Image: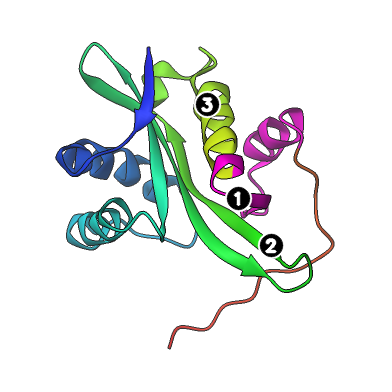
Amino acid sequence: MIITKATLEDIPQLCGLLKILFTQEAEFTPDPAKQAKGLEMIISNPETGFIIKAEKEGRIVGMVNILFMVSTFLGERVCALEDMVVHPDMRGQDIGTLILKKAQQAAREAGCRRITLLTDNDNYRAQSFYESNGFSMSPMVCMRKII
């Protein structure tokens, strides 16, 4: 298993993983062109964030995006963990834990002091996974408006 940052050449395989993720999430519908555009924006601009991938025998089997922000509360750089997914055939092999640890390490090295993430309200499996990796529930509520 090779855990590294994704490159532009990885976009087609990453889009395949995002299709899996967005098919299972309540709020999203896959759109490969939009996903490719977003992935290119992240990979091409390291100040925006980065993508960690897990690769086995030339196949990308897991990914997580980290996007940078600034917290005025902390007076520090923080980040959002986005789009974490492991291919269903590869789950249960600690790939998620490996890419999460690598993402946390890279975020710390980039000066981040907090990671925030969202899961579907009823995705108890994901919530349990994140809690087992040191995350805790926040009393804050996510709200959105498309502009």
Type of the residue with mark 2: Glu
Q: Is there CB contact under 8 Å for labels 1 and 2?
A: yes
**Dot in front, 1 or 3:** 1
On residue 44, which mark appears? Answer: none
Q: x, y (%) of residue 40?
A: 23, 55
Alpha carbons under labels 1 and 2: distance apart = 8 Å
Alpha carbons under labels 2 and 3: distance apart = 27 Å
Dot 1 alpha-carbon crowd within 10 angstroms: few under 14, some 14 to 19, many 20 or more? few
Q: Which residues are magenta?
A: 108-134
Residue drawn at x 18%, y 44% is 8
Q: x, y (%) of residue 91?
A: 48, 20
Which residue is labeled 3 in the image?
96
Which residue is labeled 2 in the image?
76
Mark 1 or mark 3, which has the lower sequence index?
Answer: 3
Type of the residue with mark 3: Gly
Q: Helix, strand or loop at disc 1?
A: loop
Dot 3 alpha-carbon crowd within 10 angstroms: few under 14, some 14 to 19, many 20 or more? many
Residue 127 in the magenta stretch? The answer is yes
Residue 12 lies left or right of residue 56; in this view the side is: left
Mark 1 or mark 2, which has the lower sequence index?
Answer: 2
Alpha carbons under labels 1 and 3: distance apart = 23 Å
Residue drawn at x 76%, y 35% is 131
Residue drawn at x 34%, y 59% is 29
Q: x, y (%) of residue 65?
A: 44, 47
